[in-house]
Structure formats: C-alpha cells, structure tokens
Image (cartoon, rainbow, N blue to C red):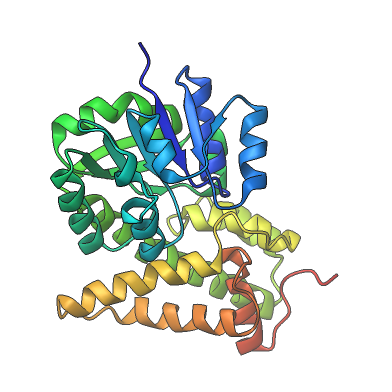
Amino acid sequence: MSLRIGFIGLGIMGSHMARHIYEAGFPVTVWNRTASKMEQAKQWGAHTAHSPKEVAEQSDLVITIVGDTPDVREVVTGENGVLAGANPGMIYIDMSTISPEAAKELAVVAKEQGVDMLDAPVTGGDVGAKNGTLSIMVGGEEDVFLKAKPILETMSRSLVHVGPNGAGQTVKACNQILCGVHIAAVTEAMAFAAKAGVDLEKMLAVTTSGSGSSWALENYGPRILKGDLNPGFSIRFQQKDLRIVLQEAEKMELPLLVTAVVNQLLRSQQAHGGNELGTQSFIQVIEQLANQSITPKS
C-alpha cells in the first residue's frame, strides 16, 4: 500500500514537487494559504484539505515548503498545525529554508509527539522543481531518511543524507552563500564587459565553458540578456537566506565579509522595488552603481 503524502506550500517550487510525488503513484493531499493554488492541484489529481491539521490526519508523511521560520512554526505547531493532527509514527519533512537551530528545535517538539522529522531543503530553482532534478540535502536520523527516500527521489537528481537534524539547513546555508556571491560576480562581470564594449552573448559563450563558469552564469546570464527578471527564486528569499546565514555566523563569531556585502546589495534592490523579482535582477543594482545599462529596456 502506498504511503499517503501530505504537501503544504504550493508556490513556485512546491506546486511542481507535489505533482512529481503524485505522478510517481502516491496519493497526495495538499493545503495552501492561497486557495486558488489548491484548485490548480485538484486538476492534476490532488486531494485538498482545510488546514495543515487536516492534511496530517490524512497522511503518513507530510512535507512543508513555505517562506520563513515563523511560517514553518505556525504551520507545524499552531492550533491547526501539522502536529495537532499527526498520528504517532508519522514522518514530517520540512523542505523550506530556515535556520538550523529552528530545525533542531522543531525536531525535538515533533519527537515528543511521536513524529520523526527531517530537514530537507532544496536547491535547483524553479527549473529543477519543474524537471524533478532538485538537489536535496537531508538532516535527521538515517533510518527515517531511508523510509522517506522513495518520496524525495521523485523530485530530485541529487539526494544526500548530510547528518543529524539541522545539518540539512546548515548545508543549504553554505549553498546560499555561494548562490548570492555567484550572482553578484555574474552581474559585475557582465557590467565590466558591457562597459568595455564587448559583445555580451560572445562573452557568455566563452565564460560558460571556462573555469569561471557557474550555475548562476549558465542560467541567469541568458535571462539577463533577454531582460527576463521573472522569479525562479526571488530577491526576497535570497536576502532572507543570507540573513539566516549571517545570524548563524554571528553566533559562531565567524566573519563572512563578502556575504555581508552581497546581503546589503540585496537590501538595496529590495529598497528599489525589486523584492519579488528574480535574483538575476541583481543586475539592476549593478546598473545603478555603474550608471551602465545592460538589460534591454521595454
């Protein structure tokens, strides 16, 4: 008999992830704060619930992927949250990006109610979610990971158990440092080439095949050239992730100078109205600083 899966959070990423699970043959019950997104999920076969509690009551394994640490706490520990409806033995997987400390705390609370928790944040953006090729880093007990592995494999290309509860979020923080610094480097390189009068398409053709290439360059460089600033991953979430990184670094008394600068530049983009644009809209910060137009203007 297939595990009954609950899925909470049907945003840019979650909507695709839930569908991959369903298409792999698992019954899926969903909940989302925006009801219209649940209606879309019903069209491909999902059942819908009226609350996270109701999702848990109908599920053997529940996944959440929501915005920030307070959102996760509300969805999981609130009056109508996941734990209010969970049966002992249920597995709970949080695939949001939250602080490692919060992940550890939630795992303890869940365990007190007989629920095993994994923190399993993802990377790969909207393209990875759509294609089922996400990279997933998992923290938690290994035997729980092995039980959940068939579900996580439906949406991933890389799936690694990285350690105990909280370790998944720590590795995701490392990833987000790299993502932030890489997009800053990509946009500065494009500004440099544009200012020098070099053809940007040719510059990208060379650099994407050289030692300076990165996922950000290969995926965001062409989008920037087209003027496509639509979010696969938004400035808001990238800045939130670096805020978490810097808060954790402060606790460890660890200086992260480059990350801190990138975080401030993301803040600048937010202040200029770019909060919900894609992270490639970082180019607008560089354009403002350099007084140099790079992206096509409508």
The answer to which quarter of the image holds residue 6 is: top left
Q: Nearer the viewer, residue 171 or 224?
A: 171
Say whether residue 171 is left or right of residue 234: left
Q: Position of residue 115 (x, y in %)?
A: 21, 39
181 versus 286 height, above or below: above
Say whether residue 274 is left or right of residue 131: right
218 versus 28 height, above or below: below
Q: Which residue is drawn at 56% across and 49% down?
A: 11
Q: Residue at x 59, y 65 (%)?
A: 280
Residue found at the very far front of the displayed protein: 79
Residue 220 seen in the figure: yes
Q: Where is residue 51 in the image (x, y as percent from the top left)?
A: 47, 45
Q: Quadrant for the N terminus, please.
A: top left
100 versus 131 height, above or below: below
12 versus 45 height, above or below: below
Q: Which of 98 and 7 is in front in this view?
A: 7
The answer to which quarter of the image holds residue 159 is: top left
Q: Residue at x 45, y 20 (%)?
A: 26
Q: Where is residue 222 in the image (x, y as percent from the top left)?
A: 66, 55
Q: Position of residue 111 (x, y in %)?
A: 15, 44
Q: Which residue is drawn at 55% across and 52% down?
A: 33
Residue found at the very far top of the displayed protein: 1
Q: Which of 9 and 135 is in front in this view?
A: 9
Residue 134 seen in the figure: no
